[in-house]
Amino acid sequence: MGQQLTMTPQLQQAIRLLQLSSLDLQQEVQEALEANPLLEMADDGEDDYSSNTADNAGGDEDAPATALPEPAALDVIDQHSHSEEEGNWNEQIPSELPVDTQWEDIYQTSASSLPSSDDEDWDFTSRTSSDETLQSHLEWQLNLLPLSDTDHQIAIALIDGINADGYLEESLEDIQASLDPELGVELDEIEMVLHRIQQFEPVGVGARNLSECLHLQLRQLPDSTPMLEQAKRVVRDYLELLGSRDFAQLMRRTRLKEDQLREVIALIQTLNPRPGGEIASGEAEYVIPDVIVRRDQNRWIVELNQEAAPRVRVNSQYASMVKRADSSEDNTYLRNHLQEARWFIKSLQSRNETLMKVATQIVEHQRGFLEHGEEAMKPLVLHDIAEAVGMHESTISRVTTQKYMHTPRGIFELKYFFSSHVSTSEGGEFSSTAIRALIKKLVAAENPKKPLSDSKIAGLLEEQGIHVARRTIAKYRESLNIAPSSERKRLV
């Protein structure tokens, strides 16, 4: 004899739905709707996700409820009245408009290739959104230049060697080797074409190093720009000194006064070290919050985002066709899909309930963060929430992955609220998130001429009773994308 845990298909489905993000869940629901004829989307404003007929047909009367919680405060749009108004509006337009010319006489285009506005597959954003790469942007500008065939081939080879930041990664010798030997292209000809490309937008593209990139951008500025020539000299000859913040040596080399050097640095800081980043190279990614947290007087209210939670129900018409004692092929087909539909809806209900329990406990534990900010964040681990809701830590890990909470302070992933703790001198605990917030606050208030080192920051936290090693400070600082003290030094 022995004990073993069997993962039923229903349990596997519930676990899979639990760890899906909002977008993945909507796709999963859509696939279930296409595969199961007894599932359908519930219309807005309905009180139940499944009818009584669906619950009682072809099965036990004490079957588990399949209704999901009714969302609070949902704006209902009357689709029927909207379509009627649209139809009346169309009827007011005469079929013959008083014009002398036809559309085809002016624009020779194939309108038949475009789907109609009533087509469900028509996606306006897919036709109008910009998905332009840096290479395509440069090639578009190249086609506007009157170049010979040879120069055009050289330009295409150069554009292919430009990375996403806008820099030419390949040497001119490699570009020459990649071209057809029969063309007999010399290096000076390749460099001449490169100079043409370096005049393209975005300004600074095609540079071979940072110095050349900044110098190209300075060349595009008007001659009347203050300290322009001095800035060109700094980026051309003394960029390493500027990068190391050695201002004393820089003033000696350039013979600039402190006020003049400050103007030069301010001008250089207006330039873009990665000009290629100005051209979008991908579609924007959107985050849909699963949970919405809002404050009502002195209490915090947690609710599911109704737009992100799919609302499905059992089709009552098909469910009423299921007969108890009928073992025909059609009845068996309907009965099996009815049971699968109930399991799917119950898994969705379980997911929503678990998500609400976990989110409520997080809000209750991190009330200080919601009211006062990151510095009031408390230490929190998965085990704390697992004990509070009576679930396993693996379940809490699944439900907090790729799930987002909308709060008055912004949208955060649920995992953001979990952090390790650091002991204080009074015997209390301080979260790592709160320490990061303190580091950010100390760096923001530091003297730019004498920035705080990691050891100094550790000493300042020690004075507040927080014991953090210097190496830990460095790790937290790097996670905040804060440069070391030597790189933060600047002229005031």
Image (tube, rainbow, N blue to C red):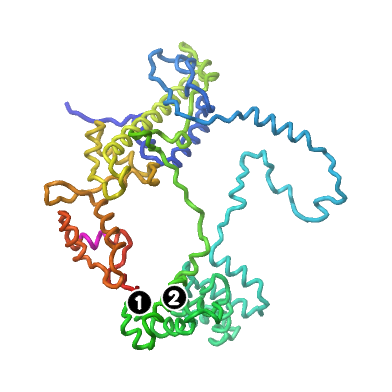
Which quarter of the figure has residue 369?
top left
Residue 102 falls left or right of residue 255: right
| Identity of the residue drawn at 62% across and 72% down | 142
Q: Is residue 129 above or below residue 322?
A: below
Above or below 133: residue 101: above
Q: Is residue 46 above or below residue 366?
A: above
Q: Residue furthest top?
A: 325
Of 290 and 50, nearer the camera is 290
Is 96 in front, or is 487?
A: 487
Q: Amino acid at mark 2?
A: Ile
- Give the farthest residue toward the front: 259
Report the Cα–Cα distance between label 2 and label 1: 12 Å
Mark 2 highlights which residue? Answer: 268
Q: Which mark is residue 243?
A: 1
The residue positioned 15% from the left and 54% from the top of the image is 465
Q: Position of residue 489 (x, y in %)?
A: 31, 72
Q: Give the residues drawn in magenta, as a range.
A: 472-476
Q: Position of residue 173 (x, y in %)?
A: 48, 83
Closer to the camera in the image, 195 or 422 = 422
Numbered circle sitting on residue 259: none
Task: Determine the residue located farthest toward the right in the rendered image.
Answer: 100
Q: From this viewpoint, is residue 188 visible?
A: yes
Q: Is residue 257 left or right of residue 208?
A: left
In the image, residue 329 above or below residue 415: above
Q: Amino acid at mark 1?
A: Gly
Q: Is residue 477 left or right of residue 410?
A: left
Q: Can you give x and y, in whole percent of width and height, for residue 411 in the image? A: 39, 46
Task: Residue 8: name its quadrant.
Answer: top left
